[in-house]
Amino acid sequence: MKMLMAEPQTNSRPRRRVAIIGAGFSGICVAIHLRKSALYDFTLFEKAESIGGTWRDNAYPGAVCDVPSISYSYSFAMKLDWSRKWSPQSEILAYIEDCAHKYDVYRQIHFSTEIQHAEFDNERSVWVLTSAHGAVHEADILITGTGQLNRPLIPDIPGLESFEGPKFHSARWDHSVELAKKRIAVIGSAASAVQLVPEVAREAARVSVLQRTANWIMPMGNRNYSETEIQRRKDHPWLTRFYRWLTYLSFEARWPLFKGNRFLQKSAEKFVLRHLEETIRDPMLRDALTPDYPLGSRRLLTSDHFLPALNRENVDLVTDRIDHIEAGGVVTASGRKIPADVLVLATGFRSTEFLAPMEIVGRNGKTLQDAWSHGAEAYLGLTVSNFPNFFMMYGPNTNLGHNSIIFMIECQTAYIMDCLRQMDEGKLCSLDLKQDVMQRFNARIQKELEHTVFAQAERSWYKTAAGKITNNWSTTTIRYWLQTRRVNLADYRVGRDNT
């Protein structure tokens, strides 16, 4: 049995051991704070051979963040030299890697180590982790940083396996495949498709975009920063911080739209529809691209290039339902055959299956899958009753439609660090959220979510098949910050050290 690294102690209590699963933005953030505190031994377990999470996996052509660059870095490690207003994937990945080097967390990472099973030993108040290779590790605190968008959704389309050309999901892009002069069929027209289609269309013979549902697409207004702008931020970092706060507040001011303000919603819809009319020349194509659901109820997309790309002669939008796939392409329900040399699945992620396929077992042998049989839920998206000393980053109901997830990640890190501090001060061996606290919290946010625009869509990746909204936060990020600033130990059943 492998033990997480321990160091000589100056007191009677061993240093608390922390296991972090996932080395993306969340895992790296909490690892940095653990490193800065110098009070804990920690290890990151990463199933891949490198760090980065979402920004390592989504390396498709044109991948760019839909949050302004200025807001997409840690507040304690602001990047002053972003090249663009909305940063590309490669630059974000390089930023995460730079932070890991700067704060010396690389040496705590176990790469190519997928944790498949984690079980809480109630007698010892210890988490026992088992990897895919059978190695066993122990930790006092378990933190998952696997996120909501890490497992690609492969659609159940008859004949998919019969396609003879290269096929891959957008989050598993095969860069060895040559796309020039090829016929590309892209299944899906949402977040990844609106970014990759314009890039692929530059060199492909034909790109067929198979759309199931039209999306609200706002212009992004992306641009390169000038050397003067970049140098000014380097010379005056306070300008970056000021601009960052302005950006945060301007995006936070969008919340009433998602709360369901009819005036703001209709105004935004008019703006987007006017942009669609000005960009798309063909009236039939405009109709096909016009959503039939309220703006914001599904993910609001931003792109400067997708709509113009649909005007190209080598790009066509297909709205017929897919019937099946055959060796040489896609066949629609109307019998239309769409020939393809390459098949790209821009079909999103299994977003409501939190932490799957990892099995996590809490008190009395109960698994998270059992606890979440009616949809994932957690207190502040962080902790679950009967799973002591267990914390999730970017867990249930912490996704945002209007601001930067980095803000939420830092709030969650602060909460976890305060838990550890209070455990140390109170000589506690375990914290287990009270069941009634979790029930009251989730009843409240589900009630709030019923009155948001997220509830107005019949289906979206925010919802389970039964219609429960398990992904999105129900109100402002300011309230989340206030609720995570300090831990209330009265919310927990505590176990005390014997030492």
Image (cartoon, rainbow, N blue to C red):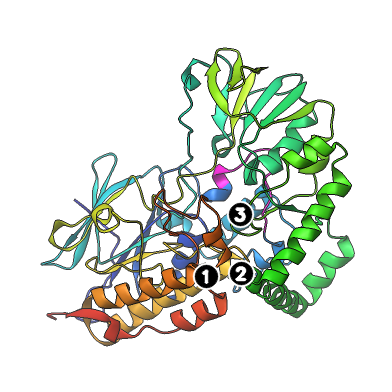
- Label drawn at residue 91: none
Which amino acid, mark 2?
A: Gly
For this rendering, which residue is in front, 131 or 466?
A: 466
Which amino acid, mark 3?
A: Arg
Q: Are marks 1 and 2 in contact (CB under 8 Å)?
A: yes
- Kindly identify which residue carries mark 2: 260
- Kindly identify which residue carries mark 3: 299
Residue bounds of the magenta highlight: 56-66
Residue 134 on image: x %, y %? 23, 41
In 3D space, how far apart are the residues under numbered discs 1 and 3 (Cα atoms)?
Answer: 17 Å
Numbered disc total: 3
Is 454 positioned to the left or the right of 16 in the image?
right
In terms of secondary structure, where does tag 3 sit?
loop
Say if the magenta span includes residue 119: no
Q: Is residue 85 visible?
A: no
Indicate whether 53 appears above or below 99: above
Say if the magenta span includes residue 57: yes
- Kindly identify which residue carries mark 1: 451
Residue at x 64% of width, y 36% of height: 211
In terms of secondary structure, where does tag 1 sit?
loop
In 3D space, how far apart are the residues under numbered discs 1 and 2 (Cα atoms)?
Answer: 7 Å
Which amino acid, mark 1?
A: His
In 3D space, how far apart are the residues under numbered discs 2 and 3 (Cα atoms)?
Answer: 15 Å
Mark 1 vs 2, N-terminal side: 2
In terms of secondary structure, where does tag 2 sit?
loop
> Magenta-highlighted stretch: main secondary structure?
loop
